[in-house]
Structure formats: C-alpha cells, structure tokens
Image (cartoon, grey):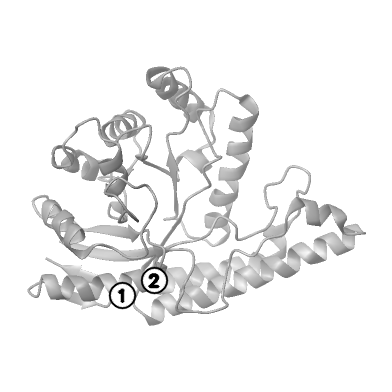
Amino acid sequence: MKVRLGYVAIALGLPKVTSSSNVTYTYYQKLATEEKKLDKLKQVSLSNVDDLKKILDYNNQNNIHFYRITSALIPLATHPDVNWNYRSIFDVEFKLLGNIIRKNNMRVDTHPDQFNVINSVDDMVVENTKRNLMFHANLFKDMKYSLGKMVLHVGSSTGGKEEALKRFENNFKSFPDEITSKLILENDDKTFTTKETLNLCKKLGLPMVLDVHHHICNNNDDNLNDLLSDIFDTWKDEELPPKFHFSSPKDSPKDRKHADLINGNHFVEFIESCKLINKDFDIMIEAKNKDLAIFDLVNSVKNLRKDWKWIDSSTFEL
C-alpha cells in the first residue's frame, strides 16, 4: 500500500509567491478604458501563472507529487460581465504548466469554491455553477492534463435531504460531460455525511473523496471502517488511485477549523485502518501550514512508526 501526501494552493516554503492574486470587479470597473481593464487582468493572471510554475517546480524539487491548484488562478475568468479571452492569451503558458505536471508524474486537482451548488433551488445559482465548473474543466483541457479532477460538495439541503439529493441527480444529468467526467464528491462537515455522499456517488458512478475530519464532525453514528471498502471501490474505474482529505481540528475534536499542523497519532491510526484494504491512495493535507505541515507530519510519522518504508520525502509504503 503506497500513500502520497499533498497540500493546498500556497507553498509557504516560497515566500512572496502566490498564484491567487486577485482583481475585484469593483476595481476592474473603475479602470478608465477597456484597454486598461484588459491589461490589468493580463498582468495579474500572468503573475499567477508564473508563480504556479514556481510552485510546481518547488513541489518537484521536494518530491511532492500531489497538489491542489487554486480556483483564483485567473481573475474574473467566469464573471458574466467580463468574459475575456484568457484561454487564447495564455495558451502557451497553460501548455507549459501541463508539460511540467505530466513530465514529473504529478497529480493535480482543484476544489471549486463553496458557492458552486449543483443542487441549488435557484436556477441562476445552478447556471453560475455550470459556468464556474467549466472554467476548471477548461483549465485541465488547456493544460492537456486529462487526469484532472475537481472536488465538490453535494451542496444545499433545502427541502430536506431526500429532495436535495434528487435535485442533485437531476441537475447533474443536465450538465455537460466536460464537467461531469471531472467531478468527484466530498462528504461535508455539517450536512451530507460520508454514507449519504457515498450512496450518491454509487448512483451517479462518481468517485468519492473521503474527508476524514468531516466524517468525525458529521456521521450519524456511521462507522467509517464499515464504509472504507465501498469508498475505495468508487475509484475502481479511475486511472488514478483514491484521494482522501485529512486535517486536524484547531481546538476541540469537532472544531471545523483546520489546525496549523496534523496530529501524527490520529494520522497513523487512520492509515492503519486503511491497511486492511491494502490499496494505494493519496492524501490531501488540509492544514494552515500547507507544505510545511507535510514536512512536520513526515517527521512525526517517522518517529511514531519507524518500520514504515519511505520512498521519498512525501511518499511511504506499508
């Protein structure tokens, strides 16, 4: 069983590097001419893309093979009143990013923001979600990275969970294949449990992303060990192994806020529960200290389990 560790968006090991610089629509509107508006979007986007390249290179140098790209890479890319041709402007840069990812056998994905709700009762929200998700699908396409996936929560429970799940299923079927083929669903910490998300994934034929801490916060007394095998099985037709999310609470055990680092004892306990299934998987570390949390966790695990075999600085094998 091989496990790879990844992190989210910001590389704290690279000071003053960010791929998430923004241009607000309010600021954009204040610019005097269309030329100045476009120049500002191009300037900030190029900075983000260049910094993303630096982060990917940094990951490669540090043997980190799993990474989540920010959703804020291209400012105002999906704003209905902007609609600028960033895809053609940055065609070469996107291809370069994809080349780095493929050449170094990296796994990258995205996690569209929480306001993307496929099962909203508001048709406008659903249409906006479709447009936003298409941005992510197009990014993978422009990078020529066919393995790209985007993580999404089930969303709204308006009208009750049963109706909300039916609404998700119906709306999902109306979305284009460019989106639905890239979606993976994650259990959340307040509404849809692991089991409910798993059942929806089975029905729609989607892979499921288990968030371990979300399960602790929201589980309806379901035992995670009873669900693990079925969660792994949702990935059986995928080229990449299953991916999980792991975080530690900032304060109390069910605190939904992420801690700076990962509790090594809890992490080891979870890994050993997966050993019974004995299949490869990847874990996205969701911690405030980002990449530095990976390095801290590795040191912790090496002290706790001296017999585990480390393939490189972020990959181990049991």
Out of 276 and 13, give the one closest to the viewer: 13
| Residue occupying the point 68% across, 57% down | 75
Q: Which amino acid is tagged 1?
A: Phe
Q: Position of residue 26 (x, y in %)?
A: 79, 51
- Confirm whether residue 177 shows in the render: yes
- Label 1 element class: helix
Viewed as shown, does residue 87 lie left or right of 229? right
* Residue topped by disc 2: 291
| Residue occupying the point 31% across, 49% down | 238
Viewed as shown, does residue 81 lie left or right of 206? right
Pointers 1 and 2 in contact (C-beta within 8 Å): yes
What whole-number distance in Å separates the C-alpha atoms at marks 1 and 2? 7 Å
- Confirm whether residue 314 shows in the render: no
Out of 176 and 58, give the one closest to the viewer: 58
Q: Which amino acid is tagged 2?
A: Asp
In the rendering, which numbered label is found on residue 281? none
* Residue topped by disc 1: 295
Q: Is residue 177 above or below residue 138?
A: above
- Label 2 element class: helix
Q: Position of residue 126 (x, y in %)?
A: 59, 31
| Residue occupying the point 26% across, 32% down | 195
Residue lying furthest bottom in this view? 61
